[in-house]
Image (tube, rainbow, N blue to C red):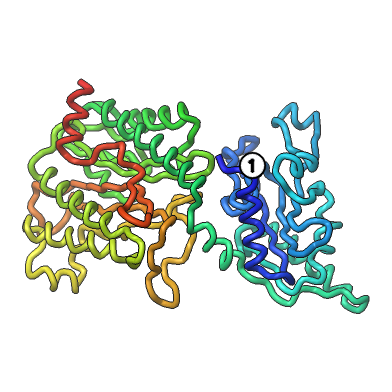
Amino acid sequence: MIEQKEYKRRRRQLMRMAGADAIAIVAAAPERVRNNDAHYPYRQDSDFHYLTGFGEPEAVLALVPGRAHGEAILFCRERDRERERWDGPRAGTEGAVSRYGFDDAFPIDDIDDILPGLIEGRRRVYYHFGRDTEFDLKLIGWVNRVRALVRQGAKPPHEFVALSHLLHDLRLYKSRAELALMRRSAKIAAAAHVRAMQATRPGMNEHEVEAELLHAFRKQGAVPSYEPIVGGGANACVLHYRANDAPLRGGDLLLIDAGAEYQCYASDITRTFPVNGRFGAEQRALYDVVLAAQLAAIDEVRAGRPFDAYHEAAVRTITRGLLRLGLLGGTLERNLREHSYRKFYMHKTGHWLGLDVHDVGDYRVDGEFRVLEPGMVVTVEPGLYVAPDAKGVPAKFRGIGIRIEDDVVVTRGEPEVMSADVPKDADAIETLMAAAG
């Protein structure tokens, strides 16, 4: 759990970066209608959550450095006994101050009257334009109200600045509390993957295995951090496979890409294993190439190394393996130079991880890949995908898709693999599945 003092520290840090003559405005995520009267499950905007820990919709955070009556202001719904009977309890303006540590709070219905006055006199407005068109228009309207009073001495802002320039760099470095939540998320997801391995049998359907994952997530108070991929056989060669509705056959591999979200923090794990519990010779050969690539990549997730170093390590290992198996020809260096591996490995080896599965933060700074630093978290996920109709490939390799993914923390020493509880060595996977009967 993240304590309120950490949210306060984040708000203060953002205000210091924004400057005394700025205002930062962050809106909560709107509720989304799924169909007719049914809503999608509500999930707070990640930036709003990062700064507030406040889980309700219809809320706006205004950070006003130097304001005498309080710098951190929340606009939120008032308490309403009748609505709370239907939708559950609300913090209200009193709870926003007493429970969530804001300096001041106002009813969201009063924002049109109050926020223009907070904007007045500020030179810069930090905000996320383009996320919510309806709120964009409201903000422009508030600014225009200030501009309309220039002849009366009002001072409108001169500049709009993307809030991401400041906030997303803060989010890139995880605190001890954040890492604790991410370790918990990874443990939940790892246990779900183990459960899925133990439950899988030939003749099951992909959606039955997905159900095992979802059961494990919800039992531990988590939800999926993204739509799980459960792809058997050639379906594993579809990188973002979503149907999860095909029968599983003995002799095929099953690729599961599934992460848990716990208290808004994500994990992201992929494992590939045989439906019948035993790898075939060609499956094992390709699998061992991917595993070797992943281990080589993880070893590069170290402070002081550029972000792309672990991708380059994976690519070199995969290319060497493909040459050894005869799926590529020529020299290692020529194949690397010509990117020949992309026929079988067409994505990058990882991404930032945190409140979002594909978390925020620049990968390049001044045109160069960012140097990894302690507290950053990445995924490491090399793969091989041999399409069923791949030309010039021995038939025994066609239709095999493999990916192995773990969540890794950059430390001051050895990389920390948070998702290590789920096996990935081929022998260990076979042993686990055999023990499940």
Q: Which residue is drawn at 24% across and 32% down?
A: 248
Residue 358 located left or right of residue 399: right
In the depicted view, which residue is nearer to us: 209 or 382?
382
Residue at the (81%, 49%) spot, across then down: 106
Q: Position of residue 348 (x, y in %)?
A: 31, 60
- Judged from this view, the residue extending furthest toward the top is 437
Q: Nearer the viewer, residue 388 or 340?
A: 340
Instruction: Please indicate whether residue 65 sits to the left or right of residue 5 in the image.
Output: right
Split into 4 quadrants, where in the image is the N terminus?
A: top right
Secondary structure type for disc 1: loop
- Work out whether residue 150 or residue 20 is closer to the camera in this orientation and state it: 20
Estimate the x, y position of residue 124 in percent, counting from the top left: 71, 72
For the point 8% across and 70% down, the residue is 331
Q: Where is residue 300 in the image (x, y as percent from the top left)?
A: 28, 60
Compared to residue 156, the image places residue 357 above or below, namely above
Task: Name the residue beneath numbered marker 1.
Answer: 55
Quarter-of-image position of residue 330: bottom left
Task: Please tell me whether residue 191 is drawn above or below residue 294 in the rendered image.
Answer: above
Question: Label 1 is placed on what type of residue?
Answer: Gly
Few, some or many residues within 10 Å of mark 1 (<14, 14–19, 20+): some
Query: Looking at the image, is 384 positioned above or below residue 311?
Result: above
Image quarter hosting the C terminus: top left
Name the image quarter holding residue 208: top left
Q: Where is residue 258 in the image (x, y as percent from the top left)?
A: 37, 41
